[in-house]
Amino acid sequence: MIGEFSKSNGFMKLVYINITFFIMYTIIFVPQTISGHIPIAIFTDNHLAFSSQNKIILENPWTILSYMFVHKELLHILPNMIFLYFGGKLFLQNFNNKQLISVYILGGICGAIFFKVIFNISNGIFDETKPLIGASAGVFAIIVAIATHKPNFKIPLLFIGNTKLKHICWFAIILFYISNISNSSDLDLDRSSDV
């Protein structure tokens, strides 16, 4: 497994890291849920997820990077990894591994900054106790980068036919924002924001 990881290209390394974190979290989370005591969820929210609160950010500055590799639910990681897999393959047809990883990391950092700014100007509209987790910002950065580079590149989609990359990109972004708007109205304070 380690040998396969070292030989893999940039986007597959990102996929492996995200899936490994998810499997580790799930392996620890499930028995803790059964016992009724869930310290892994608390640890993740406090030390791996990106917070909107200045005090927590200053105490855990690494979270601006770690959050983009953390997923708690299968329905959160699955679409992110599908988009990363296909978006990454397309990206690598035009750019290199180093550029892909750079775009993913910079996209994730920009996503965290955007998250922080939104909470600062929202005046309590959003729940400030919800931290940010997920690969979406980095994944969308890759998709936007390739869609900007080749907007009219056509991709064959099942039941739809050939679709321009720019239209797929816009659809993904709209879907992403609809998902986050619905999550922001969720009253469950234990659930992290999905980005």
Image (cartoon, rainbow, N blue to C red):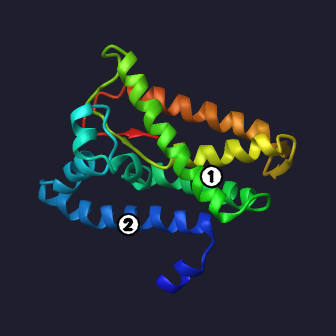
Question: Residue type at mark 2?
Answer: Ile
- The residue shown at (65%, 49%) is 142
Could one spot residue 13 in this view of the protein? yes
- In the structure shown, which secondary structural element does the residue marked by tag 1 occupy? helix
* Residue 6 screen position, x and y as percent: 54, 79
Indicate which disc, 2 or 1, sits on the residue closer to the N terminus: 2
Given residues 166 and 32, the one toward you in this image is 166
Which x, y percent locates residue 99?
65, 57
Residue at image point 59% right, 68% down: 12
Is 16 situated above or below 135? Answer: below
Q: Nearer the viewer, residue 161 or 41?
A: 41
| Whether residue 24 is situated above or below residue 168 in the rendered picture | below
Q: Is residue 143 left or right of residue 132?
A: right
Image coords of residue 158 (percent x, y): 78, 51
Q: Which mark is residue 23?
A: 2
Determine which residue is flagged by label 1: 83
Residue visible at 30% across and 51% down in the picture: 48
Q: Amino acid at mark 1?
A: Phe
Q: Among all residues in the image, which is located at the extreme bottom?
A: 3
Residue 1 appears in view? no
Mark 1 closeness class: few <14, some 14–19, many ≥20 residues within 10 Å: some
What residue do we see at 26% from left, 32% from top?
54
